[in-house]
Image (cartoon, rainbow, N blue to C red):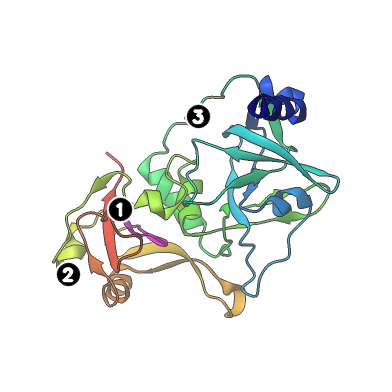
């Protein structure tokens, strides 16, 4: 009897659309947050001391599909808890969005499948981002609008730089990038030998950061320099020098280990044919 009552109560409090419209798709770039109150705010969120909104997980591109887990309300604001095959959050992180900018559906929307840009176009897009600010969770350089307010989240984080350049076809976080594409064997190589092995658009990556090779002399990345003017941003650095700073604190590995979250390693992944 008790189980029956619990089931009945669940049916009574479940929104009527949830049974028929449990899916949605973004009809414009849409902020996705890791805190419910952030999704419910409807306005710009005050940044931290480093100028970052850590509640921002990523910005869903137009056409990103969602599964609606539940509807909630904070004050007068509605929000959805969602999941998406387009983004895999860290363990324990839940995703929340505002209903504004979503179109609900009774059936799942397909994943976005735009054509991959050509390597020359990818390199052009990456280079054109130089000078943009670092934005935690940012992957749309022009940002987004919230309600009638100004644009916010205009800038790119490290994996967001690559995500934007590839039209969202590369993984959105470094936890997935460490296993994306094909492994380039680098264990035990000196810096000079490693330089000779790298190709344009190879990823020098570990859980927490990614550096993209532009050519045999340059690399590009988006870095957060908390407290410095501008708090960092997208920059190009000499590849040899950048490898030196990485190898001073990390060892090159052929593959990212499955049993360690953040070892002092880095890998190189080759993701284009």
Sequence-wise, which precedes: disc 1 or disc 2? 2
Which stretch appears magenta? 201-214
In the foreground, 165 or 152: 152
Is residue 121 visible in the rendered structure shown here? Answer: yes
Residue that carries the numbered disc 1 in the rendered image: 202
Dot 2 corresponds to which residue?
Answer: 192
The Cα–Cα distance between marks 1 and 2, rounded to whole angstroms, is: 16 Å
Residue 256 found in image quarter: bottom left
Q: CA distance from mark 3 to mark 1?
A: 25 Å
Mark 3 — residue? 111
The quadrant of the image that shows the C terminus is: top left
Distance, label 3 to label 2, CA atoms, is: 41 Å
Q: Main secondary structure of the magenta part?
A: strand
Residue 2 position, x and y percent, is: 67, 29
Q: Looking at the picture, does residue 97 appear above or below residue 5?
A: below
214 on left or right of 58: left
Name the mark nearer the viewer: 3 or 2: 3
* Mark number, residue 58: none
Residue 113 placement, left or right of 3: left
Q: Secondary structure at mark 1?
A: loop
């Amino acid at each position: 009897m008790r189980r029956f009552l619990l089931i009945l109560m669940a049916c009574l409090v479940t929104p009527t659309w949830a049974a028929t419209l449990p899916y949605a798709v973004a009809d414009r770039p849409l902020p996705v947050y890791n805190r419910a109150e952030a999704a419910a705010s409807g306005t710009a969120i005050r940044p931290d001391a480093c100028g970052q909104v850590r509640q921002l997980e990523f910005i869903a591109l137009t056409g990103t599909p969602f599964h609606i887990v539940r509807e909630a309300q904070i004050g007068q604001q509605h929000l959805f808890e969602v999941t998406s095959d387009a983004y895999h959050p860290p363990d324990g992180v839940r995703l929340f969005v505002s209903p504004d900018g979503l179109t609900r559906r009774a059936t799942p929307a397909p994943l976005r499948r735009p054509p991959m840009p050509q390597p020359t176009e990818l390199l052009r897009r990456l280079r054109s981002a130089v000078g943009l600010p670092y934005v935690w969770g940012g992957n749309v350089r022009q940002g987004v609008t919230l309600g009638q307010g100004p644009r916010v989240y205009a800038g790119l984080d490290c994996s967001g730089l690559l995500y934007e350049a590839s039209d969202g076809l590369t993984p959105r976080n470094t936890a997935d990038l460490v296993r994306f594409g094909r492994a380039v064997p680098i264990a035990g190589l000196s810096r000079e030998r490693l330089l000779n092995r790298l190709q344009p658009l190879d990823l020098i990556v570990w859980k927490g950061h990614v550096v993209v090779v532009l050519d045999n002399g340059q690399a590009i990345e988006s870095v957060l320099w908390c407290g410095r003017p501008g708090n960092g941003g997208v920059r190009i650095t000499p590849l040899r020098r950048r490898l030196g700073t990485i190898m001073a604190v990390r060892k090159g590995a052929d593959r990212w280990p499955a049993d360690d979250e953040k070892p002092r390693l880095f890998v190189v992944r080759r993701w284009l044919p």
